[in-house]
Amino acid sequence: MADALTGTDNLSPGYDSQQAVYGKLVSMLQGATAQMNGGAGPNGDQVYGGDMAAWETFANSLLLRVAMRMSDVDAAGAKSAGEAAIAGGVIGTNAENAVFPYIDAAPNNNPVNEANKTRNDFAASNTMIGFLTALNDPRMSIYYNASAADGLYVGEVYGLDETNAALTPDAVVSQPGASVLAGDFPGIFMDAAQVSFLLAEAAERGWAGAGDAEANYNAGVTSSFEFWGADGAADYLLQADVAYGSAAGTFSERIGRQKWTALYMQGQEAWAEYRRMDFGVLLPCADGSLDGDGGVPSRMKYPLDEQTLNGASYAAGLVTLGGADALETKLWWDVN
């Protein structure tokens, strides 16, 4: 990170430790918010239309996310950064969401919409369909269409190899819903649902200003329903397996499962929170894995170009990584 983006001045940039990267993220976000004074922002701002107060709220929300990501390995530093973020003001409603506004026309349409024009194998997985079905989740009919073959919600077996996956006709599994495939479906950087779940966790960890854990949890679910245009959030929250006071598991598991559901179409963030919060939804690939120990991957490997073109720094970086360059090597913040 420190050696990056220097061009020809340094063709073999070194690797910073993950701990150092997170420390730098905290200082960069705090430095950015310190420079925001609520005045008019630049022309051409596609996210907030030049509203710097909204950008400050977004920056605080990102700081809260970064703080929570490192909360299990640097409790004091995470608490300090997280409390500062909350005090500064975070996203509280869908109207404040940080999203990129695609339009329903090429070339500025959502990439998922564009990809669907030439291939239609972006099917629901049995993991997601099974989870949503078990909780009678109304969002399922928005996330997905019923299968064309029988009108039921059916997920493809997760993790099939290409040969076995090709045996399943598209018509017998659920395809993405119209909202997901819309050309103007926004790119989500940060939304009210995930911030509410972060606040619920912050409350459980005793961070000042976080409010009540259950109220924030309920707000996270409700915000997700509102974003997707789903009805029935109140009834959904009354179910014993969903209600904060009766759902199974630790607070991290309870919050994590609902956060994972709300993070649909935000795959990288959902994967990160699965690894950090350990709520046990994902399963190993049905047909094994391309690499690693066969379990759910804990990280991505470095690309081959990095290994061949920056070999010395790559080798030194493995020491910083604290383990092999393998899918099962956990990241610094993934300690559970």
Image (cartoon, rainbow, N blue to C red):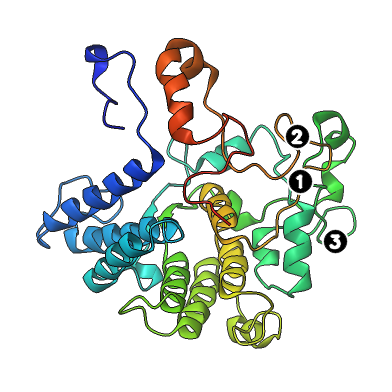
Q: Which of marks 3 and 1 is in front?
A: 1
Q: Is residue 299 above or below residue 252?
A: above
Tell me whether circle 2 and circle 3 mark residues in contact (CB < 8 Å): no
Q: In which quarter of the image is the C terminus?
A: bottom right
Tell me whether circle 1 and circle 2 mark residues in contact (CB < 8 Å): yes
Q: Residues within 10 Å of mark 2 (few under 14, many from 20)?
A: some
> Which amino acid type corresponds to the residue marked 2 in the rendered image?
Ser
Helix, strand, or loop for circle 2?
Answer: loop
Residue 242, percent from left and from top: 66, 80
Q: Residue 284 carries which label?
A: 1
> Which amino acid type corresponds to the residue marked 3 in the rendered image?
Gly
Cα–Cα gap, marks 1 and 2: 8 Å
- Mark with earlier residue (3, 1): 3
The answer to whether 236 appears left or right of 17 in the picture is right
Q: Place residue 62 in its image quadrant.
A: bottom left
Q: How crowded is mark 1: few (under 14 residues within 10 Å), some or many (20 or more)?
A: some
Q: In the image, what residue occupies the spot 38% across and 37% down? A: 17
Q: Quadrant of the N terminus?
A: top left
Cα–Cα gap, marks 3 and 1: 28 Å
- Mark with earlier residue (2, 3): 3
Name the residue beneath numbered marker 2: 289
Q: How many labels does the image show?
A: 3
Q: Nearer the viewer, residue 56 or 119?
A: 56
Q: How crowded is mark 3: few (under 14 residues within 10 Å), some or many (20 or more)?
A: few
The answer to whether 22 appears left or right of 219 in the picture is left
Q: Place residue 247 in its image quadrant.
A: bottom right
Helix, strand, or loop for circle 1?
Answer: loop
Q: Residue 47 carries which label?
A: none
Cα–Cα gap, marks 2 and 3: 32 Å
Name the residue beneath numbered marker 3: 151
Q: Which of 171 and 307 is in front in this view?
A: 307
